[in-house]
Amino acid sequence: MNIIQDPGCDGSVLLDGSASGPSEKDAPPNLSLRAQAFVIIENLRRLVHNACNRIVSCSDLTALAARDAVFLSGGPNYSIPLGRRDGTTFATRNVTLANLPPPTANTTTILNSLSTKGFTPTDVVALSGGHTIGIAHCTSFTPRLFPTRDPTMDQTFFNNLRLTCPTNVTDNTTFMDIRSPNVFDNRYYVDLMNRQGLFTSDQDLYTDSRTRGIVTNYAINQTLFFRDFVNAMIKMGQLSVLTGTQGQIRTNCSRVNSNNLFILSGMENNEDEKLASY
């Protein structure tokens, strides 16, 4: 398998590694992606392909699953452009690192990185609001706890995190939004205003004068946040997509079709006939 140097929304993160190198899944920024999530996407592919044959790509299924996860968690429902096709290559570790700023990055680093892809500061702050749901491992924010407290972190918040993460090598997890961890809402921005953002990349959005006002606006206006989040997600979902005759529609989301041809219903092998399980 060849290695591509320009990752986009082509389902490449779903691919397993090969003799050519480790997959995007194995790159540090993607290690937090749960194995079960990849299983769910593959199960969805099988259900959809069984119902309507091989006309929906793994890329589109991933975009739809993200949208539905947001909606089912209390967030906005929205229409997204479809018609993506799946890539046949994945990005190298270095390219993945270059395209996904770490949680230790400050606002300048994040704005500079995403501006090259056409994202505005408003887009960046809105997309960061996705941290209103989910969990994080201690190792992604221990630099803010050890050897001393990050001065931008609220003292009580720090004390509680030190109970969860008693050492700088603890691998426990905590919610990214302490106010409503399982609801997609604007409380994440309220956290930031109270100096209770988990990552440096979170809290610095309120510390930095370029993005502070956007954080404040979202904290007091959830409708505005939802609107801008939808716009930014739609923009994100159209980065370097493959359409038309480009790429392929994978018959298994974790690997490239062996002959790159459209496979009709019933032509998969026995292994693919089984639903993946976790």
Image (cartoon, rainbow, N blue to C red):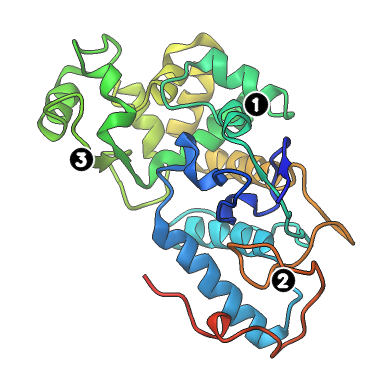
Residue 40 in the image: state x and y as whole percent. 47, 68
Between the residue at mark 1 and the residue at mark 2, the CA separation in whole angstroms equals: 28 Å
- Residue type at mark 1: give it: Leu
Q: Residue at x 43, y 17 (%)?
A: 204
Classify mark 3: helix, strand or loop: loop
Q: Residue at x 28, y 26 (%)?
A: 196
Classify mark 1: helix, strand or loop: helix
Name, please, the residue furthest toward the front: 19
**Residue on which disc 3 sits:** 172
**Residue on which disc 2 sits:** 56
**Residue on which disc 1 sits:** 114
Q: Residue at x 48, y 53 (%)?
A: 75
Between the residue at mark 3 and the residue at mark 1, the CA separation in whole angstroms equals: 30 Å
- Residue type at mark 2: give it: Val
Residue 56 in the image: state x and y as whole percent. 72, 71
Q: Which mark is residue 101?
A: none
Q: Is residue 221 visible?
A: no
61 vs 105, left or right, is: right
Q: Tally the marks.
A: 3
Between the residue at mark 2 and the residue at mark 3, the CA separation in whole angstroms equals: 37 Å
Q: Which numbered disc flags the more N-terminal residue, 2 or 3?
A: 2
Question: For the residue carrying disc 1, how many other residues have a C-alpha within 10 Å: few (<14), some (14-19), or many (20+)?
Answer: some
Is 43 drawn above or below residue 9 in the view shown? below
